[in-house]
Image: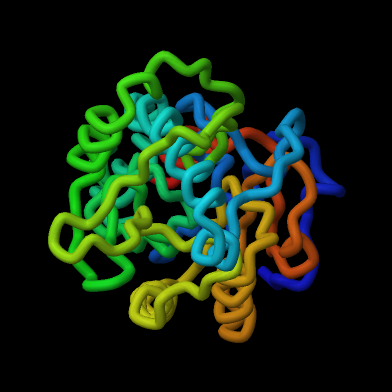
Amino acid sequence: MSNANPVSAEYPPDECLDAAVDALQGRTIAVLTGAGVSTDSGIPDYRGAGAPVRAPMTFQNFMADLDYRKRYWAGSHLGWKRFSAARPNPGHAALVQLELAGIVDGIITQNVDGLHLRAGSQRVVDLHGTMDRVRCLTCGQFYARQSIADQITAANPWIDTEEAFELSPDGDVEVRDVQAFVLPECSVCGGVLKPDVVFFGEFVPKEKFAEASALMQSADALLIAGSSLIVNSGIRLLEQASRRKLPIVIVNRGVTKGDNRATVKVDAGTSETLVSLLHRLSE
């Protein structure tokens, strides 16, 4: 099947799923996931229908301004409690079963929620990092996120009584007044701490992208689930698959930047579609 044009505009949903199964059947699949995979776990999408308009923290602002760091850490601390309580959904579970069956070779995720690993997926490339680790930008020391959360609560006993507003896909919320907030510090050198995630304005680490590319090179097909492909790292992986003329299936509600290069575009929710693909590809 050619990957020149998507078929979702031409087929009703059932036939579109048939086309996706036909494109993937008998092939080893690399999976690229975005925020849409986690919406059924209660974590919102940046760009999906109803998503609030917001300006995520940039690395440049975080590093340049103490007030930005206070705002980020105060909001991220409140969001972390809700974020870390999220549980894998049926879409995550379907990908685990596809991997156990040898159909999926591994998952490249743009998400920072750690839900693929918590669901039981074995080979996961967290392209944009993970919120459950914190790194010192001065000395490189790593910390478990919970230990930093404990430090924040001890230094800011008022923070946990603050009202949390809209949760974002990176585990952040808006906090009204952060002037009194005491920032966490590295216990080794007193340096600036940052969750081990890629902020807007940062590059994906070369070694992470190399891991993702290696997974792509070993695959016979690419399944993209829940990503609008706005972020450059996702487009680069799509281009790798396109250059190799691999079948490309995109599952996402709404338009993505990769639709014109998809073999099949399934405009539907990720959880139900991944569960359907599990049943059909395992037959």
In the rendered image of this protein, does residue 155 appear above or below residue 102?
Answer: above
Residue at point 63% right, 78% down? 239
The picture places residue 77, in percent across and down from the top left corner, at: 39, 34
Q: Is residue 104 visible?
A: no
Farthest right residue in view: 10
Quarter the C terminus occupies: top left
The picture places residue 270, in percent across and down from the top left corner, at: 56, 37
Judge by depth and name the residue closer to the eye, 264 or 229. 229
The picture places residue 266, in percent across and down from the top left corner, at: 69, 45
Q: In this rendering, would 177 be left or right of 230?
A: left
Q: Quadrant of residue 244?
A: bottom right
Q: Is residue 71 visible?
A: yes
Q: Quadrant of residue 191?
A: bottom left
Quarter the N terminus occupies: bottom right
Residue at point 48% right, 44% down? 70
Q: In this rendering, would 182 be left or right of 49?
A: left
In the rendered image of this protein, does residue 151 appear above or below residue 32?
Answer: above
The picture places residue 34, in percent across and down from the top left corner, at: 54, 50
Residue at point 35% right, 52% down? 130
Farthest bottom residue in view: 243
